Image (cartoon, rainbow, N blue to C red):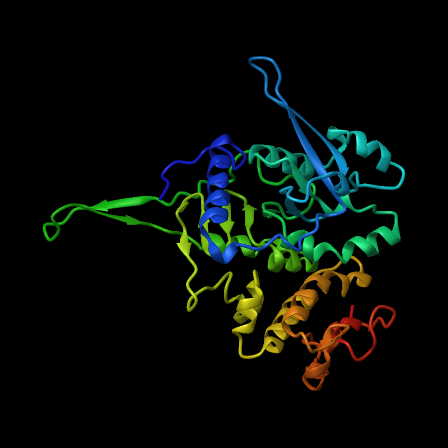
Amino acid sequence: MQTTLAQSTRSPQAFEQAKYWIQDCRQNHKECHRSRQDATLPTRLVCVKREEPGSGSEPELSAHICESDSLSANVLYLTLSHAWGTEKFVTLTQSNLDQFRTSIPFKTLSRTFQEAIHVVSGLGFQYIWIDSLCIVQDDQKDWERESLKMGDVYAFAVCNLTASAFDTGGLGISPQERLSNPVPPRVCIKSSKWRSSVAFIICEGQPWRENWERPIFRRAWVLQEQILAIRALHFGRDQMFWECKHTLANEVWPVGRMISSNRAPVNRRRQFDARRLNHYSNDSLRLQKSPYDTWMKIVYDYSSRKLTYASDRLPALSGIASLFTTILEKDEYLLGLWKKDIHRGLLWRQTESPGDFNKPDWSHAPSWSWASLN
């Protein structure tokens, strides 16, 4: 257990810990290895450049949009999960695309994006994929094309950064200073029955559960990002949390604990807890008695989450559906349901009280699909 932590989760000390988690996972966790043989880079990435200044000054960062066809296929990149919030912020549009290819005006970016770019540099990477900076927001064709690729974007990223500290978007990836000290107090007790004093650690609350209950994890799009990302680095209110298929850890307990097959509440067996679904692999899905049961639990979780636009209801699930098509090779995906399990899939119902009934919207899904409800 760490007894002292740096003042911020974006300090050099914190970055060194995060770099260790990533490096250790990539080198030693067989469960977290994903072949990049069939991987394709995202169409666009944000390229981060670090310019070393003179002595006594901090390095300056610059960023621009780069097209992946100009990059090596082995380029490593990060991704970002964030809440959009209600305030407007700079995004990629048809009018600024050419400018952003040369340089993104750093100070015009939302605080969350600025801090995410600093994290990329602090972790020693050069590229990050951010939805609203890598998809042309006012080009419907570009959005439709790129939204179908999001599954692979998150699946083949080195790590997904999650800005879970704040209730709304745009406030940053994490507080400038920790909102509280997450290190639990220790009490040493001496007794004649013991040869030496015994230290007891007083743990208040459950940090991991508190992090998962943050508003960002109620966003529908984020479920897909959670499930498909191999590794996740969560920037919480008072510490970083590390999550991969092998290990759960945080800054207070940096060694973490290994996820065992019979007690994994987070990665390997989230299909048994619809509130906390996360990383799946082809192998883990095949081990289940019925992948259809797993799909239903995913839909149960997903349908309770928030979407800004009803038209996103199926696109925001398309990456997970694509993963299932590799498992259910002889089945057909039907707008939220599976053909061979259609007899059960049609038995969906709305769980809210009649007064909360959501009016169906048949412009995005047929009436027989759960996706028709707003």
- Residue 52 location, x and y as percent? 61, 20
- Observer able to see residue 32: yes
- Residue 35 location, x and y as percent? 59, 55
Give residue 53's quadrant in the image. Answer: top right
347 displayed left or right of 232: right
196 displayed left or right of 180: left
Q: Nearer the viewer, residue 217 or 191?
A: 217
> What quarter of the picture does the N terminus occupy?
top left
> What quarter of the picture does the C terminus occupy?
bottom right
* Residue in the image at 55% along x and 63% along y: 276
- Residue 329 location, x and y as percent? 67, 74
Note whether 34 is above or below 321 in the view shown. Answer: above
Q: Nearer the viewer, residue 95 or 285?
A: 285
Outermost residue toward the bottom in this view? 343
- Residue 45 location, x and y as percent? 72, 41
Outermost residue toward the front in this view? 37
